[in-house]
Image: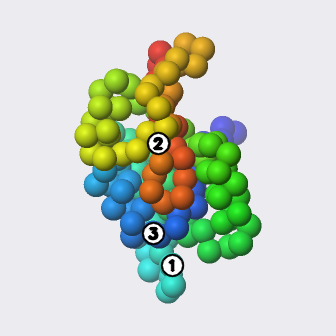
Amino acid sequence: MTMKIRLTSIPVTDQQHALDFYCDTLGFEKKLDIDLGEFRWLTVVSPEEPDAAQLLLEPNAHPASKAYQEALHGDGIPIASFAVSDMAGEYQRLVAAGVAFRGEPADAGGTMVAVFDDTCGNLIQLHEAGNS
């Protein structure tokens, strides 16, 4: 048996705002959008791997989720890391789109990393490695 990651989630303060940011600014594509009443089952995927792992934009409505999200953000800890093949190019593209980074890309032991605020309550790290 081989396990595969097909879904992971991050808490977001507003699902529609998150969808707009993750698709329009970052470049992900909407995969699923299912109305669940007050909230939605809302996932995005990489356009390069539409059948790979989905990212669930999950409302931070539960007090524990909100506290976890706020604690990570307050301590400067990214909640997720996304692989990029061209850190310099992606950094410049996102800065031009108005994304707020916590600093310029930096070498972290052979891997270039950069952290930005996703405007939905989270810090996200980009990483570029030899074969990301």
Q: Position of residue 28 (x, y in %)?
A: 35, 49
Crowding at mark 3 (Cα within 10 Å: few <14, some 14-19, many 20+): many
Please indicate whether residue 72 sits to the left or right of residue 54 in the image. right
Q: Residue at x 62, y 74 (%)?
A: 61
Q: Of discs 1 and 3, which sits in the foreground? A: 3
Classify the position of the N terminus by image quarter: top right
Crowding at mark 1 (Cα within 10 Å: few <14, some 14-19, many 20+): few
Q: Of discs 2 and 1, which sits in the foreground? A: 2
Please indicate whether residue 90 sits to the left or right of residue 42 in the image. left
Q: Are marks 1 and 3 in contact (CB under 8 Å)?
A: yes
Which type of secondary structure does the marked residue at label 3 adopt?
Answer: helix
Crowding at mark 2 (Cα within 10 Å: few <14, some 14-19, many 20+): many
Please indicate whether residue 16 sits to the left or right of residue 24 in the image. right
Please indicate whether residue 90 sits to the left or right of residue 66 in the image. left
Which disc, if any, is residue 116? 2
Which type of secondary structure does the marked residue at label 1 adopt?
Answer: loop
Measured Cα–Cα span from mark 2 to mark 1: 26 Å
Amino acid type of disc 3? Gln
Which type of secondary structure does the marked residue at label 2 adopt?
Answer: strand
Q: Badge 1 is on which residue?
A: 39
Report the colour scheme. Answer: rainbow
Quadrant of res 77: top right
Amino acid type of disc 1? Phe
Q: Badge 3 is on which residue?
A: 15
Q: Residue at x 70, y 54 (%)?
A: 71
Measured Cα–Cα span from mark 3 to mark 2: 18 Å
Amino acid type of disc 2? Phe
Q: Position of residue 45 (x, y in %)?
A: 40, 50
- Of pointers 1 and 3, the one earlier in the residue sequence: 3
- Of pointers 2 and 1, the one earlier in the residue sequence: 1
